[in-house]
Image (tube, rainbow, N blue to C red):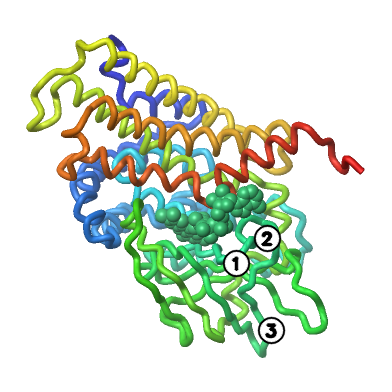
Amino acid sequence: MRHATASGEASCGSAARALGLDAEAMELVARIDEMGPAWARRAARYDAAASFPFENYEDLRRAGFLKLCVPKRHGGLGAGYRLYALLSQRIGCWCATTANTFNMHVANSLWTADLVDELDLTPKERKGHEARRVLHYGRMVAGKLYAQPFSEASSAAAGISPFGTTATRVEGGFLLKGRKIFASLSGAADYYGVLCTEAKPQARASRRDTMFVAVPADAKGVSIVGDWDPLGMRGTVSRTLLLDDVHVPDAAQLMPRGIYIQAATRWPHMFMTLTGTYLGLMQAAYEFTIRYLRGEVDGMPVKRRMYPTKQIAVAEMLVKLETAWAIWLRAVAEAKLDPSEEERARALACQYTVMENCNEVCRLAIRTCGGQSMLRSLPLERHYRDSRCGSLMLPWTAEICMDRLGRGALYRKGETDE
Ligand SMILES: Cc1cc2nc3c(=O)[nH]c(=O)nc-3n(C[C@H](O)[C@H](O)[C@H](O)COP(=O)(O)OP(=O)(O)OC[C@H]3O[C@@H](n4cnc5c(N)ncnc54)[C@H](O)[C@@H]3O)c2cc1C
């Protein structure tokens, strides 16, 4: 009986305690919950039109959330990894598209604040980074929106090869050239945080020369091409971004040159931040199912909870949801510099579990609620389509997670079968 009334709000409270978050953090959760119902009401419209949820971002901007992970000393709200993770879960509960895109914005501050401070940098790099992030954080505090297109139609975003997008050194800055696919927030962002490879004359492209650079949306040579009519997460508007000899000044760098690879290697949980979105979405699908079967959804007053098959399906969904919560809380709490091999593996297992369970819970939700729940007038069919996207997100797709987990478990460092 307890579970029939279990709500995402209650899970969020216990998660906050598990992550050691304070009352200030819960105030931010409460602010999301104030804005959330309007996002949930608008979601179908943005999904149908495959258009960006500008109204939701106006809400976030007004509430100061565009500076969420900007450190307090730079005028931001100072949310760290754990708090962001929890808030993203809560946003995902109300609107998965908003959470997914918000993650791209937030990564530009989360990846460049404490995370970079913990890495090995020379004093000169540290000084330069501090000066440049004053500029970027100032923009976020002023309400500017950043995107994070790093995917290319190659193995670069999977971390296998260098990014094909290049940055060539020129007087006072860099010239960027390349093509980014799935640039969420395309047309909505003020800046695109692009991962690219510094082109060095007479040297082969190397992942060690990866740069992270903010490109203004209105810079000469920036264009957005291609249509956008996908299966799910339609409001992310993730079209193709073309960079045709775009000049950016030195100050555009979001990380010191060459530091990205150190971050990616030593702070692997930076790639796990989208799990909050899909944990929230899973929670939403579960809660909808409970209300539907109890006859509490508007226009659907028929109770269906008395059938044993429904009860079993709901129990299955709850087990998947709780499994995801459990590994997620543990992995989020373990996010840090130089995690152990076991913690690295758990982060991959967490990504896999959350993304796959999300889709499974949504699948079970449709099957058990039945035909009427599939209608577009209800949110479940959208949740189902959105849920399919989580496992596709590079660099930690479901397949890559499994591949790395299996190999990592069977081979010690440097071991081969030769
Ligand atoms: C809604 C949505 C929003 C997105 N937003 C962004 C964004 O804002 N920024 C961004 O950078 N990207 C974004 N992406 C892109 C996403 O992160 C992936 O880059 C994209 O889905 C990859 O598509 P692909 O067909 O090129 O995959 P491919 O790289 O061709 O991979 C196809 C599949 O092969 C498998 N695979 C690939 N490489 C390996 C490997 N080395 N080992 C084992 N298996 C492998 C994976 O399972 C993968 O799913 C978004 C994607 C979606 C669906």
Foreground: disc 1 or disc 2: 1
- Element at badge 1? strand
Q: Quadrant of the N terminus?
A: top left
Which residue occupies 10% across, 32% down?
A: 298
66 left or right, relative to 399: left
Q: Is residue 188 above or below residue 202?
A: above
Mark 3 lies within 8 Å of ligand 1 (Cβ measured): no
Question: Ligand 1 near label 1 (Cβ, under 8 Å)?
Answer: yes
Measured Cα–Cα span from mark 2 to mark 3: 18 Å
Which of the 4 image quarters holds residue 316?
A: top left
Query: Which numbered disc flags the more N-terminal residue, 1 or 3?
Result: 3
Residues tagged 1 and 2 counted as in contact (Cβ below 8 A): yes
Q: In this orientation, does residue 183 appear?
A: yes
* Residue highlighted by disc 1: 195
**Residue contact at pointers 2 and 3, CB within 8 angstroms:** no
Which residue in the protein does label 3 denote?
A: 169
Q: Which residue is mark 2?
A: 260
Residue shown at the point (50%, 62%) measured from the top left: 148
Q: Nearer the viewer, residue 70 or 208?
A: 208
Q: Amino acid at mark 3?
A: Arg
- Depth check: 185 or 239 in front? 239
